[in-house]
Amino acid sequence: MQLIDGKSLSKKVQANVSTEVEKLKREKNIVPGLAVILIGDDPASHAYVKMKGKACENVGFYSITHNMPDTISQDEIIATIKMMNDNPRIDGILVQLPLPAHIDTQKILEVIDPTKDVDGFHAYNVGRLVSGMDSFVACTPLGVMKMFEGYDIDLKGQDVCVVGASNIVGKPMASLLLNADATVTVTHIYTKDLKSHTLKADIVIVGVGVPSLIKADMVKDGAIVIDIGINRIADGSLVGDVDFDNVSPKCSFITPVPGGVGPMTIAMLLSNTLKSAQRRA
Ligand code: NAD
């Protein structure tokens, strides 16, 4: 069994981004800029935004956070996004999810200029992804693809089972895998017999939010298991969606939590923002 080390892979990506940022500054006098819109007091959202801000600082980006109370109106959020759309110093706009219940998330995401949509959630970019065209791709599934690349894992013809079908994780993951010529099964909460699907798969990718959902008897010997889940359990520690201790001995490759997909997500946000700034240049 080999661990897929997202932490060290993400450091390599960040080092490359830093080098490219230096080049952009030197040759074009451009500093990539990321605007983050953070609404409400959710501690996890605040922690993620803090990590993203720190990562931006480390690679030499300009970054700003618009911190708004959860009583804010939809129109005020839209006005802030439009301001960022028009701001030439901003290459990427990220709205930290989830949003408060009175806000229509899809409506908000559709206001972001698709050329600054570094989270890849705008329907324009989703449509391009599904069509196999160049687009901004959601950072978490893109980070998983980067892991396959980093460990020379060829996806062509592989049977892959994606567990979880959200717009930000499972669906874009499935599109990327299809574009890479894998045979993809997408499962979700209403799937009748989850085990029958995971057991057949060469690769299981799970992003659900249920600790230990994937157990040892659900994966075949030699499988590759990618755990996207992040769950805080009673003792305060972070765990994924895979029963790591019992599943890992059966795997050829597996990602740990923490230190797996999480750091890659942030690295891909930096990489997407750089891509946007390079287009501007
Ligand atoms: P979500 O709630 O939007 O979607 C969950 C998906 O899982 C749904 O499709 C649902 O049908 C499915 N599901 C729920 N229970 C299931 C079950 N028992 N069996 C099979 N499928 C089931 O969540 P999300 O935003 O997609 O996030 C999923 C997980 O991934 C969470 O733990 C989240 O914290 C984590 N996440 C991690 C990163 C990262 O950077 N590592 C990024 C985004 C999300």
Image (cartoon, rainbow, N blue to C red):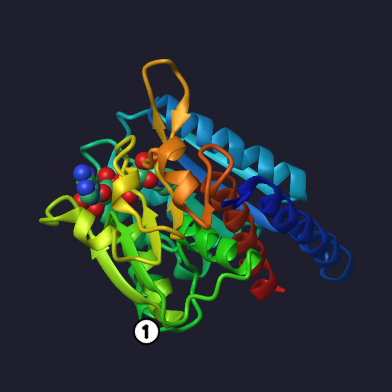
Q: Tell me: 204 left or right of 149.
A: left
**Is residue 26 toward the left or the right of residue 237 in the image?**
right
- Where residue 110 appears, x then y in whole percent? 34, 62
The answer to whether 24 is drawn above or below residue 207 in the figure is below
Residue that label 1 marks: 131
Where residue 57 appears, x then y in whole percent? 73, 42
Quarter of the image containing the C terminus?
bottom right
Q: Quadrant of residue 89?
A: bottom right
* 249 and 152: which is toward the camera: 249
- Residue 176: image location, x then y, percent: 43, 72
Residue with the most extreme right position: 26
* Residue 95 showing in the rendered view: no
Measured as percent of width and height from the top left, residue 234 is found at 37, 17
Residue drawn at the location 44% of the way across and 54% of the way down: 225
Residue at left offset 33%, top offset 41%: 98
Q: Quadrant of residue 77?
A: top left
10 Å neighbourhood of mark 1: few (<14), some, or many (≥20)?
few
Above or below 51: residue 275 = below
Q: Nearer the viewer, residue 226 or 24?
A: 226
Q: Secondary structure at mark 1?
A: loop
Amino acid of disc 1:
Ser
Q: Residue at x 59, y 46 (%)?
A: 263
How many marks overall? Answer: 1
Q: What residue is drawn where x is 50% and y is 57%?
A: 139
